[in-house]
């Protein structure tokens, strides 16, 4: 039996196309009521109008679903309040937020990326996610099983687009911080790193990689797992997931067994044992900052909990 979303109210930013549109259609078809937020911007983050959001709302309504359009720019200080207030006025609750809005900004390589470009990217990806989540937080608590999905990217493993990668890495940190708060109030906050053929990935240069993305990663194939993350049955909090092609996998930071240097000659000791510092034969995933510190102490005392 398919999991039901009847009457759950889900805010989706950047839902006028691509992944956000796919999420909106998937959830609306299963009973969710959707706030389709999109300011109609291009992939560089230049604002447009409400037409894209309205188009998705019309598609959902034509299929028998419930949705409303919102054109707030997530970089506006009042955006979160505006989006949440519209959801509350329409349906009286907020059960989930999918922070999907994003844009590329700046060139390739640090020499082409200004500090202003970085701050603009940060305002869209990170601060925008904070604004919407912060405004929704008390309503997510009231829901009893509120859910937040933030959007990072597999680019954080390394690609020469420093503005975008920096912001997407920050999203992982934001998720971990929010998850620590969420655990106390019945909310779950997770991150997705989706692969999908969208307007943004449409800028990939012609070649095998572009062909692979277009062939294997329609945005609709990321929607079921993201849907699960905003369902009350989702068991995870603070995790990051690689998503695409109807496949999902956990991504995580881990600490290796490392190497304890001879204090009398620590510099040379590290240099002579460099491979042992990075050897992943032993590792652990700390649950939080205190657990990470305890790991160091436990290893120094010979009681580490390695996998």
Image (cartoon, rainbow, N blue to C red):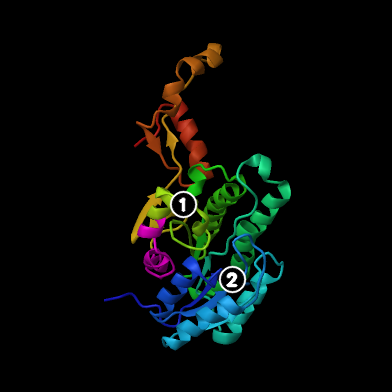
Q: Determine which of the numbered discs, if any, sits on residue 206 in the image.
A: 1
N-terminal label among 2 and 1: 2
> In the rendered structure, which segment of residues is drawn in magenta?
213-234
- The span from disc 2 to disc 1 (Cα, nearest Å) is 41 Å
Nearer-the-camera pick, 285 or 218: 218
Residue 259: where, in percent of width, then height? 45, 23
Q: Is residue 225 inside the magenta stretch?
A: yes
**To which residue does mark 2 refer?**
136
Image quarter of the N terminus: bottom left
Q: Which residue appears at 59% of the width and 71% of the height?
A: 136
Image quarter of the C terminus: top left
- Secondary element under disc 1, as helix, strand or loop, is loop
Whether residue 254 is visible, yes or no, is yes
Secondary structure, magenta segment, majority class: helix
Q: Check whether the beta carbons of the residues at disc 2 and disc 1 lie within 8 A of each other.
A: no
Nearer-the-camera pick, 261 or 69: 69
**Number of numbered callouts drawn:** 2
């Amino acid at each position: 039996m398919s999991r039901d979303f009847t009457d759950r109210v889900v805010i989706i930013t950047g839902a006028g196309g691509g992944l956000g549109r796919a999420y909106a259609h998937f959830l609306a078809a299963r009973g969710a009521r959707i706030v389709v937020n999109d300011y109609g911007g291009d992939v560089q983050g230049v604002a447009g109008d409400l037409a894209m959001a309205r188009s998705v709302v019309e598609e959902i309504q034509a299929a028998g679903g419930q949705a409303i359009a919102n054109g707030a720019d997530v970089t506006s200080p009042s955006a979160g309040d505006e989006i949440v207030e519209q959801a509350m006025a329409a349906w009286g609750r907020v059960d989930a937020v999918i922070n999907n809005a994003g844009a590329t900004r700046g060139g390739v390589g640090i020499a082409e990326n200004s500090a202003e470009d970085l701050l603009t990217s940060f305002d869209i990806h990170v601060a925008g996610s904070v604004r919407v989540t912060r405004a929704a937080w008390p309503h997510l608590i009231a829901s009893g099983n509120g859910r937040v999905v933030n959007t990072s990217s597999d680019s954080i493993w390394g690609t020469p687009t420093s503005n975008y990668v920096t912001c997407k890495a920050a999203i992982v940190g934001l998720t971990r911080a929010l998850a620590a708060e969420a655990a106390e109030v019945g909310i779950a906050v997770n991150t997705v790193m989706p692969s999908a053929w969208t307007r943004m990935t449409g800028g990939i240069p012609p070649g095998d990689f572009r062909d692979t993305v277009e062939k294997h990663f329609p945005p609709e194939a990321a929607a079921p797992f993201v849907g699960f993350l905003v369902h009350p049955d989702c068991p995870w909090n603070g995790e990051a997931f690689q998503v695409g092609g109807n496949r999902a996998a956990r991504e995580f930071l881990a600490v290796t067994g490392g190497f304890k240097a001879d204090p009398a000659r620590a510099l040379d000791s590290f240099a002579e044992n460099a491979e042992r510092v990075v050897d992943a034969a032993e590792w652990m995933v700390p649950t939080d900052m205190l657990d990470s510190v305890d790991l160091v102490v436990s290893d120094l005392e010979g009681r580490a909990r390695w996998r």
